[in-house]
Image (tube, rainbow, N blue to C red):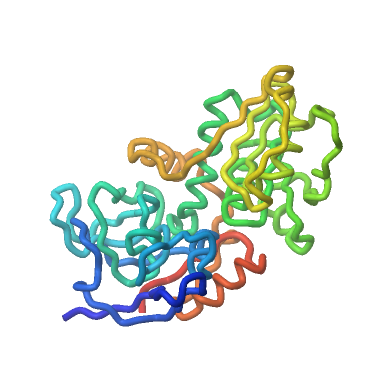
Amino acid sequence: MTRFLAYRLHARDTGARPDGRITELTFADLPPGEVLIRVAYSSVNYKDALAAAGRNAIIRQYPRTGGIDLAGHVAASDDPRFREGDAVIVHGFGIGVDHDGGHAQYARVRADWVMPLPAGLTLLEASTLGVAGYTAALALHWMEHNGLAPGHGPVLVSGASGGVGSVAVDILSTRGYEVCAMSGKEGEHTCLRELGASSVIAPEVAAQSGKPLETARWAGAVDAVGGPVLAWLLRTMQPDGVIASFGNAAGPELDATVLPFILRGVRLLGINANSPMALRQRVWAKLAAEYRPRRLATIGQVIGLQELPEAMDRMLSRGTRGRVVVRMAD
């Protein structure tokens, strides 16, 4: 009987932090699904860290293996679309939340959730990108669909030292955009410039001014923060500027007026990375080609499964940067 390791979350008393520990499992412990995957890499996302800490009621049924993305090889398949040995990616669709996810050496998932690894990417590169890289690429995909192009003006990336933000800085600069990175981590400013940012600013510049409109500065913005930062971005966008919003690290509330929309034609796009498969394939194909970051080796840090708990704690205390990839092989 095949045995393997997983970082498993077990329930404690209501409201208490789950008991997370590395556990030995067998295939019989895995949830139903048509495709069994030998996981090569997963990653650490903010949602994973919140779930492991028991915050925001992300996980409601225990025990649960976290990890909202994974990359690996098919070990067995009951679906003719996939054969043993195929390199594949899975993210979203509830894995790591209400279905066991990637923080294990094996995972079993529904075939409709599985995407072949795009040509031109390795499994390590795909996991360094992960759901964070996909979110950054999806944001740019819809921003360019709504008229954003290099030469229109600077593009601001908030939360720029995080997983989505660092990939966004890299992709945007590679595409020829002038990138302004916003980060409250002063020690990361040099790294952000190395990723391609032309300038770096602190979140404090987004203080409430009381004005419904301010000096127009940005042609576009990739916003991982929300709250007062998103309100400030709306006030400071150029005419026909485009904002992609997908985070609420600074709060879910939005204190804004309609004036940026009706006087400057600002476009505010909501980004949900749990996309239909056809859109995933289109955006991942771009990640392997024209959206391919040039500095993935700088963005990603690879750790072992034993280091996963400490990495999630560091993420919650803002002690990480870029992408943390978990190597699942022994």
Q: Residue furthest top?
A: 263
Return the x and y of residue 13 as percentages of the image width and height. 46, 76
Q: Nearer the viewer, residue 291 or 206?
A: 206
Q: In what quadrant of the picture does the C terminus appear? A: bottom left
The residue positioned 39% from the left and 51% from the top of the image is 92
Q: In what quadrant of the picture does the N terminus appear? A: bottom left
Return the x and y of residue 224 as percentages of the image width and height. 62, 47
Return the x and y of residue 70 as percentages of the image width and height. 38, 60
The residue positioned 41% from the left and 58% from the top of the image is 69
Return the x and y of residue 276 as percentages of the image width and height. 36, 38
Q: In which quarter of the view is residue 298 placed?
A: bottom right
The residue positioned 39% from the left and 61% from the top of the image is 96
Q: Nearer the viewer, residue 179 or 217?
A: 217
Q: In which quarter of the view is residue 263 placed?
A: top right
Number of labelled discs?
Answer: 0
Q: Residue furthest front?
A: 14
Q: In which quarter of the view is residue 26 placed?
A: bottom left
Left or right of 53 in this view: 121 = left
Please tell me whether residue 176 is drawn above or below residue 195 in the rendered image. Answer: above
Please tell me whether residue 204 is drawn above or below residue 186 in the rendered image. Answer: above
Left or right of 53 in this view: 126 = left
Q: Nearer the viewer, residue 86 or 252?
A: 252
